[in-house]
Amino acid sequence: MEMFRGFLFISIAMILFSLNLSNVEGRIHYHKKQKKGSPVEPPTYAPSPDDPVSQSPSYPPPVSQSPSYPPPVSQSPNDPPAVPSNPSDPGNTTSEDCVFDVMAFGAVGDGCTDDSAAFAAAWKEACAVESGVVWAPSNLTFLITSTIFSGPCKPGLVFQVDGVLMPPNGPDNWPKTDSKKQWLVFYRLDDMTLTGSGTIEGNGDQWWELPCKPHRGPNGSTKPGPCDSPAMIRFFMSSNLVVSGLRIQNSPMFHMKFDGCEGVLIEKLSISSPKLSPNTDGIHIENTKSVGIYDSVIANGDDCISIGPGCSNVNIEGVTCGPSHGISIGSLGVHNSQACVSNVTVRNAIIKNSDNGVRIKTWQGGAGSVTGISFENVQMDNVRNCVIIDQYYCSTKACQNETSGVYVTDVSYKNIKGTYDVRNPPIHFACSDTVPCTNITMSEVELLPEEGELVDDPFCWNAYGIQETVTIPPIDCLQDGGPEAIGESGTYGCY
Ligand SMILES: *[C@@H]1O[C@H](CO)[C@@H](O)[C@H](O)[C@H]1NC(C)=O
Ligand SMILES: *[C@@H]1O[C@H](CO)[C@@H](O)[C@H](O)[C@H]1NC(C)=O
Ligand SMILES: *[C@@H]1O[C@H](CO)[C@@H](O)[C@H](O)[C@H]1NC(C)=O
Ligand SMILES: *[C@@H]1O[C@H](CO)[C@@H](O)[C@H](O)[C@H]1NC(C)=O
Ligand SMILES: *[C@@H]1O[C@H](CO)[C@@H](O)[C@H](O)[C@H]1NC(C)=O
Ligand SMILES: *[C@@H]1O[C@H](CO)[C@@H](O)[C@H](O)[C@H]1NC(C)=O
């Protein structure tokens, strides 16, 4: 009896094992090489908020694997499953049979062969299993063209870049039929992670030199001409996202952009582009809620982090910016639009050698509000416009005076210390003529000239609030209490 039981147990175990093994083999070995024009080729069509794509979900994918590529390895049942045996194998987060190495899908990784089809094929399979991992291994450089990685997918999907991922080099090499507005797009996903120890390289330099870009035309002018430049990594209409660990650099435009997302955790990123690279915002969010950005270092030619309309519950901690244009809420209210931003906290930040520190910028006109904003423990190091609210933002010099504005209220600055570049006053509150800024709280704001002496005093226009401690330099222009007209106007159309 005991022997029989033992035998039964072993038999069952062997059956289970062999079932499992063939399952693994199915996943690892029988990857069909994608031919050009096959259904998994990435759609070249670019979704935009104005024009959402209605792609049919690719999940679950049709099971049409031919067993011919790569040639099946004949394994004895005792061989370990053939999974990537790389030391940095991401196996810890998932079981190994969920790793889809792009090399097994025909990627070359030599930096010049177009590996887009291999990534699309690996994505498709990883998408269909729980906790699937699309894996771009280290020491290889993968060139891929503009690609939309779309869901819905099974939860726990990981896109792991340990090598280098890069787009074609500049506008001349960009495939004519590809969108020039975006490169890597992650669309309609829930519970997905983009991570790795590798680099996402944007090859941005030729895009920055387009004559349409600021100061890039002859003699520093700006010329008309094609100007579209791809945002490097875009997350669109997705939720519960994690982006961590990667180095992201030299983007043609914004490095990362989130629109229409909810639940975003960004941590331990290193983002860099040259100081004079135009429009290379580090992380841009709009219409996105519940965002945490932590422990990241950003150096670029535009806003370090920019927060557009429709964002709320944003927490930024442990971020170092510079050179950059600082951390910015806005611009808001363009073309008389309504903009709502609420509950944004920036804490324990360092901003250095930047054109702005912490900024709120709105166009004249528009509606809505910016409310519940807190900047706390921010170290400024040689920064122009350390603390600035600009409700007269205008990028064209041709803006009309308007009779409405985005209401800015409940903004607190606490423990903001360091040095400023004397070319601009360190504190500048230029609030709307019609909708003054209210309830600005200043506490332990102490800013000293980096070198030389303050040329202009802090500036305020229509700004109301309190100083809990003496501000350095003094801002006598901040008015006590509140203006008569404003009262409690509620949310200004924001909910
Ligand atoms: C793997 O996971 C275990 C338990 O979750 C953890 O203790 C260990 O540090 C992890 N190892 C690596 C290399 O990440
Ligand atoms: C990658 O290259 C480095 C340096 O040549 C080497 O030390 C390392 O072992 C390589 N890693 C892999 C996974 O091949
Ligand atoms: C650029 O400036 C130089 C010197 O001022 C001038 O000679 C030249 O014509 C200008 N070029 C253009 C394209 O405006
Ligand atoms: C503000 O946002 C934080 C996340 O950054 C969240 O934990 C908190 O609940 C939000 N507060 C309100 C009042 O919504
Ligand atoms: C807007 O108003 C300011 C101050 O009243 C005035 O100096 C300026 O000329 C006006 N601009 C336009 C375009 O009307
Ligand atoms: C002023 O703003 C602070 C947050 O900065 C908030 O706690 C406080 O309730 C606001 N005061 C009024 C009167 O709205």
Image (tube, helix red, strand yellow):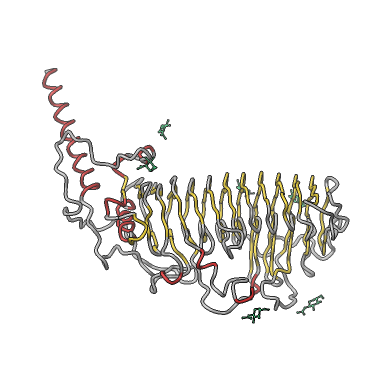
Residue at (53%, 49%) from the top-left corner?
270
* Residue at the farthest top position: 2
* Residue at the farthest right position: 476
In this picture, residue 401 sits left or right of residue 146: right
Classify the position of ligand 3 by quadrant: top left, top right, bottom left or bottom right: bottom right
Q: Position of residue 23 (x, y in %)?
A: 21, 43
In this picture, residue 455 sits left or right of residue 219: right
Q: Position of residue 288 (x, y in %)?
A: 55, 57
Compared to 50, does 70 lie above or below?
A: above
Task: Give whichever of 201, 100 is nearer the camera.
Answer: 201
Q: Position of residue 119 (x, y in %)?
A: 33, 56
User: Disc count in the image?
Assistant: 0
Residue at (61%, 71%) from the top-left corner?
214
In this picture, residue 286 sits left or right of residue 470: left
Q: Position of residue 126 (x, y in %)?
A: 32, 51
Quarter of the picture containing the C terminus is: bottom right
Quarter of the picture containing the N terminus is: top left
Residue 160 seen anywhere in this rendered image of the structure:
no
In this picture, residue 459 sits left or right of residue 382: right
Residue 208 seen anywhere in this rendered image of the structure:
yes
Task: Give whichever of 432, 422 is nearer the camera.
Answer: 422
Residue at (75%, 47%) from the top-left corner?
418
Q: Quadrant location of residue 177?
A: bottom left
Compared to 314, does 231 lie above or below?
A: below
Task: Give whichever of 426, 309 is nearer the camera.
Answer: 426
